Image (cartoon, helix red, strand yellow):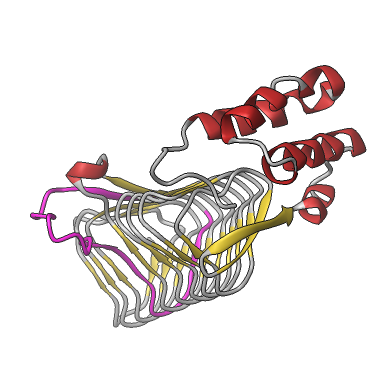
Amino acid sequence: MADIHPTALVDPKAQLDDTVSVGPYTVIGPHVKVGARTRIGAHCVIEGHTTLGQDNHIYPFVCLGLASQDKKYAGEPCQLVIGDRNTIREYSTYHIGTVQGGGVTRLGHDNWMMAYTHLAHDCVVGNHTIFANNAQLAGHVQVGDWVILGGYTVVHQFVRIGAHAMTAMCSLLFADVPPFVMAQGQPAQARSMNFEGLRRRGFSAERISAVKAMHKALYRDNLTLEQAQARLAELPARYPEAEADVALMQGFLQGVSQERGIVR
């Protein structure tokens, strides 16, 4: 049997693995599924069609799977899906999706989510991210792998943040942040590329040189976005090791809307 504190209220229909632990005064609803070895702290609320994978650590006062704050939401059985090995700290709030946004809010694997983080409806967050205290996502935001959001970063709805990007504390994002970019400000502007983060993740000197070339094309040579994309197409011939990195950037830029653009 799962290790459930006597004061916790767990609906009999909830599906908890036998190795799950649940702290005092936590409330878990009937449509919740929790995977092996996940630890849920005291005073948490987990409702809705919420699925948690294995080896997650949910700290006290976290609320997961509550109805979205979208006024169009009319009670449809939408979902919150959380992967494996995530740490979710105190007072974080992650909502289910909406029909208009695909019906699922999703958090991947191995994410480090600090206190008071917020995932609104239909957000999709990848793997190995770090959200510092009070990082907040509005609805429909997409966050790539290895992204780091500084404390009090606020992201406007429908913004996309590419893999390996990073924001400084108190950044306000109204435009897309391409992969590898470091952004800061209100509204945020591109300041550099996340070179130190890439080195820590084992990027070779050649791959980092390619990222520098991408930064130059996007931000330093006074090119339009279309001209910069043409420049990017030339880089794999110069930096064969970075072919996948260039493709990552090209794929992201192809999805940029004319209305929103990228941080400049």
Residue 69: x and y in percent read: 22, 64
Q: Is residue 56 magenta?
A: yes
Task: Residue at 32% x, 76% y: name it.
Answer: 26
Q: Quadrant of residue 104?
A: top left
158 relative position to 29: left or right:
right
Q: Residue 108's spot in the image, x, y percent?
A: 49, 47
- Which image quarter: residue 208? top right
Q: Nearer the viewer, residue 14 or 214?
A: 214
**Residue 5 appears in the picture as rendered:** yes
**Outermost residue toward the front?**
222
Residue lying at 35% horizontally and 81% vertically, measured from the top left: 43
The part of the chain drawn in magenta is 55-82
Q: Is residue 68 magenta?
A: yes
- In the picture, measured across the screen, residue 152 lies left or right of residue 45, that is right
Towards the viewer: 92 or 222: 222
Chief secondary structure of the magenta portion: loop
